[in-house]
Amino acid sequence: MASGSCGLDPVGGDVDHVIETLSESLSLETRYLALKEDYLKTGMCDPAFNYSGDRRLALLVSAVKTDLASVCSWGRQADPRFFDQLRLGLGVSSSESAEAEKELSNCSRAATAGNTDAFYLAFSRFKVSALKMILKKFRSVREALPPFGASFIHKKMESLKMVRLTPDGRPDCDNEFVSFDAFSKAIQGYEKLKKAGKLPANSRYLTIVDYTKPSNSRRLMVLDLSTHRVMNQTWVAHGDGIPDLNQAEKEKRSRMRPTPTPFPSEKGGSDRFGSNPKTGNEHKSNLSSLGFIRAETEYNGTWGRSLRLHGLEAGVNDQMLSRGVVLHGWGVDQMSWTSKDNFMSGVKAISSLGALDGKSMNELNSMDGRMSSVAFSEVNNATKGCLGVSEEPVRVRQSDGTFKGEKNQKDLLIELLGGKSNGVQSAPSLIFNYGSVNQKSPYFE
């Protein structure tokens, strides 16, 4: 059921309250289906929706980095099948991949021989040479999509659970929409909090963060309950639960090879494969909090332009303001999302590195670091408890449902959630952090 078929599209600002009153008289199922149908029409879940070819390549390079590590991991025989598939996907000849093939053989021999130093040296050379081949190929082909093609990218993203595919190989947007249980709980809380005066009467946006999904899934969704439209969907980090590292621990991790980036969220709960991150309400826990949250004022702080968050549930999230849990952006340095200029300059730097023979371990680590600077970071991202979002330019949805112009993702969310969407003053959004079907709250049954 489309939102238009419900007769819910506003024709003027004064009609919003009437529209929402009519909307609240509809069943939860009808409202859910109206929002879902609107979402499916947008195609938001496709990796191509907001991200141009060079950025999708950066996502893919990150996935390939993970695969290369498994191809030549410590103590295991190298599996040549992945590299063959990569070469076919690139469309390169054997001669073009000869350097990487040679380093793969060296890496395999070092791993099976059990020589740790030799393994790390060979692995670094293999990874750098393979990624250099990928980036060189991309640099030589100017297409809307990287030379791999959409199907290769989609399949690789599916393997990392960054997108799910339909049987014909297209992104499955149906499965990327928020679950009915999360929506039902969020709506019940939204209406009870409004009636209790804990939300402004003109509040219209509801944001749902679904922590049952991994952080490499776009699990943050902003809903306009007045028009039954989905305004935005994006990735969002969870709290890692790791106390701040002292200098000795930082130095120890910096010496590890390969360097852990980002630090593993061993206490906050790894959600790379879909398990819920650990949550909490305690000071210095660096954990995310579940439940209902009201967006507050924006400010400029450690993370630049940010949005304060006020937890509305006693004992569950009511320490968020005092803990300094906010919505902030991940810049290029923090999250390794790349701008086009940074990406292409990185490609140029890697392509001019020359042969690997005779390179020292330090030189190889530096080369590998430059590789990382042009790729999306590991998908298991985490913050110190905040809602961290990318600062990439994304399409802006207008109140009439069209998409017009681009805006920094962080700035767009701060304006949507803070009540200043598209330059129109409205009211702060309610945010619902969803954890499971068993989640309890006084604001829903």
Image (tube, rainbow, N blue to C red):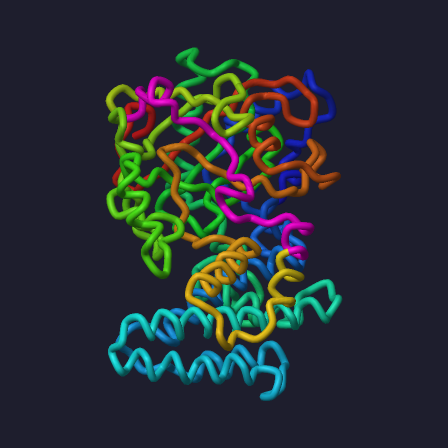
Decide which of 273, 66 is in the foreground and name it: 66
Q: What residue sits 58% from the left and 88% below the top?
A: 94
Decide which of 134, 188 is in the foreground and name it: 134
Measured as percent of width and height from the top left, residue 358 is found at 49, 75
Measured as percent of width and height from the top left, residue 401 is found at 69, 38
Q: What residue sits 54% from the left and 57% below the top?
A: 370
What range of the chain is rendered magenta?
316-345
Q: Does residue 433 sit above or below 150 in this rendering? A: above
Quarter of the C terminus within the rendering: top left
Question: In the image, is 145 to the left or to the right of 156?
Answer: right
The residue at the far bottom in this view is 94
Question: In the image, is 91 to the left or to the right of 432?
Answer: right
Q: Does residue 80 sit above or below 219 in this rendering? A: below
Q: Is residue 361 visible?
A: yes
Q: What residue sits 62% from the left and 83% below the top?
A: 96
Measured as percent of width and height from the top left, residue 118 is found at 33, 75
